[in-house]
């Protein structure tokens, strides 16, 4: 909302800010209005960057009118138009309680006629309940009054999803990358001590840097962690924060909102990924086969299942749930650490990993399980397999993947009814990184 813009100092985004200002000042095409999009996962600093740019003097000088609008997922054309009008009017716009959308549009058009405007549309989401064509039409209708404005007018669109940026036919799209560790640490120090150059003892500095690494380049997470360190000055207290999971618990509800907005088929595909270890490098073909085996991939009558699965991966990348990593000629997909925590938190009832760093009881409703054989000896409960549909074995050893026989040998001292395990849909061994190779698979 208009009231939510504030002008704060930002850290570690000089290049992105310069690029954005220059792009917004340039005239690239003949359209009176062009759209530039900033894409990135929640809390990475999209809004902060846009605010910084909004208040840049070059931007203030170049545009006759600046407007800020927070759209949110509750798309409401009346509210958005009213707020644009209020934002564009120096004195508060008196809409006299009008409920007439057309009247608002006429007023907005008159306000922007022959003016060069800069509009920020913050927090734009894709509506999964309508087709892209209908959604594009809705937006075209909403933005129609802006078309009479002066050439060089710009819309800066901020979104989690690259699909939205593409839907808007953005002339430029910038994806925000995580902040560097040192920048996260500077941000944390600013937040804890109100200045970046605070001299602190080397032990605290060491713990602070470790915490800065944990926040995965996410300014929001850095601020949450900093909040836990404020008014604490002893090494003991800082170490406790380093060990606590509470930090994630604070961030999780924010990330969960984005998960809730995924369509159901992507929700289950995403949660399923939590049975793999942290920093796991997924290969598309392998993951898609697992999704297909689970019945997560829905046929659309014209495409092959594998191709639909590829689209799912593409969609998850576009929504910042996966990042792409290229090594030599192979493309891998990786979940950023906070996103991995999110997958674990949403998959709790059905997905589980034995051998992770946290140890909790296996939920009786478990459907998908991965077992690291090194962690198996510490497991003193039998594995509930009533609802089981996936069982994946992981080992740390390098070389060829384990055979089914070797796995059965490793399990032979346990009281689990291993004979019934062959009923599960997928049963295969897999090496832990860095060597990745699919072993025996049987249905
Ligand atoms: N580069 C930065 N320097 C200092 N503080 C930052 C920086 N980037 C973000 N922040 C702060 O981190 C918090 C989260 O950033 P912000 O709200 O911009 O994230 P976002 O990407 O817009 O998230 P969402 O998608 O949930 O809206 C805010 O308090 C913001 O002020
Ligand atoms: Mg934001």
Image (cartoon, grey):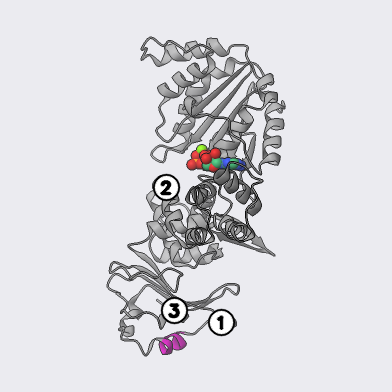
Which residue is at the front of the view, 13 or 156?
Answer: 13
Q: How many marks?
A: 3
Mark 1 element type: loop
Location of the C terminus (image quadrant): bottom left
Q: Badge 1 local density, few (<14 within 10 Å), some, or many (20+)?
A: some
If you read the primary sequence from the N terminus, does the residue marked by circle 1 or circle 2 appear first? 2
Please indicate, yes or no, whether residue 402 appears anywhere in the rendered image. Answer: yes
Name the quadrant where ligand 1 sits: top right
> In this rendering, is residue 435 above or below 98?
below
Label 3 close to label 2 by CB (< 8 Å): no
Asked whether residue 409 is drawn in magenta, I would say yes
Query: Which dot marks residue 397?
Result: 1
- Residue, disc 3: 375
Mark 3 element type: helix
Mark closer to the observer (1, 2) = 1
Q: Which x, y percent locates residue 114?
A: 63, 11
Label 3 close to label 1 by CB (< 8 Å): no
Which residue is at the front of the view, 107 or 180?
Answer: 180
- Residues rendered magenta in the picture: 404-410
> In this rendering, is residue 120 above or below 286?
above
Label 1 close to label 2 by CB (< 8 Å): no
Q: Badge 2 local density, few (<14 within 10 Å), some, or many (20+)?
A: some
Spatial separation of the CA atoms under disc 3 and disc 1 = 13 Å
Which residue is at the front of the view, 314 or 206?
Answer: 206
Please indicate, yes or no, whether residue 39 appears anywhere in the rendered image. Answer: no
Query: Which dot marks residue 262?
Result: 2
């Amino acid at each position: 909302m208009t009231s939510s813009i504030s002008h704060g100092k930002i850290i570690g985004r000089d290049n992105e800010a310069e690029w954005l200002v220059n792009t917004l000042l340039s005239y690239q095409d003949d359209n009176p209005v062009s759209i530039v999009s900033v894409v990135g996962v929640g809390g990475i600093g999209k809004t902060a960057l846009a605010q910084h740019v909004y208040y840049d003097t070059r931007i203030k000088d170049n545009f006759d009118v600046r407007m800020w609008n927070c759209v949110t997922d509750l798309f409401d054309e009346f509210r958005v138009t009213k707020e644009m009008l209020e934002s564009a009017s120096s004195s508060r716009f008196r809409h006299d309680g009008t409920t007439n959308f057309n009247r608002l549009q006429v007023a907005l058009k008159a306000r922007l006629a022959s003016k060069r405007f800069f509009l920020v549309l913050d927090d734009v989401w894709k509506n999964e309940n309508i087709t892209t064509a209908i959604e594009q039409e809705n937006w075209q209708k909403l933005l129609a009054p802006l078309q009479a404005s002066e050439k060089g007018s710009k819309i800066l669109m901020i979104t989690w999803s690259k699909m939205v940026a593409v839907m808007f036919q953005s002339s430029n799209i910038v994806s925000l990358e995580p902040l560097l560790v040192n920048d996260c640490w500077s941000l944390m120090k600013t937040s804890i001590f109100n200045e970046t150059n605070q001299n602190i003892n080397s032990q605290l500095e060491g713990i602070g840097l470790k915490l800065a690494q944990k926040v995965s380049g996410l300014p929001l997470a850095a601020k949450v962690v900093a909040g836990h360190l404020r008014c604490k000055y002893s090494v003991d207290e800082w170490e406790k924060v380093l060990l606590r999971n509470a930090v994630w618990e604070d961030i999780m509800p924010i990330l969960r909102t984005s998960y809730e907005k995924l369509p159901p088929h992507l929700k289950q595909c995403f949660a399923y990924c939590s049975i793999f270890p942290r920093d796991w490098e997924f290969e598309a073909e392998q993951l898609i086969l697992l999704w297909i085996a689970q019945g997560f991939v829905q046929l659309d009558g014209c495409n092959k299942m594998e191709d639909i699965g590829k689209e799912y991966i593409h969609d998850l990348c576009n929504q910042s749930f996966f990042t792409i990593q290229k090594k030599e000629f192979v493309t891998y997909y990786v979940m950023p650490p906070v996103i991995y925590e999110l997958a674990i938190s949403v998959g709790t009832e059905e997905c589980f990993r034995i051998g992770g760093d946290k140890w909790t009881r296996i939920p009786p409703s478990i459907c998908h399980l991965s077992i690291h054989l090194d962690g198996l000896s510490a497991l003193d409960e039998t594995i509930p397999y009533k609802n089981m549909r996936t069982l994946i074995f992981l080992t740390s050893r390098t070389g060829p993947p384990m055979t089914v026989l070797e796995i059965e040998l490793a399990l032979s001292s346990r009281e689990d009814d291993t004979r019934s395990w062959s009923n599960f849909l997928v049963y295969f061994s897999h090496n832990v990184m860095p060597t990745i190779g699919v072993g025996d698979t049987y249905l």
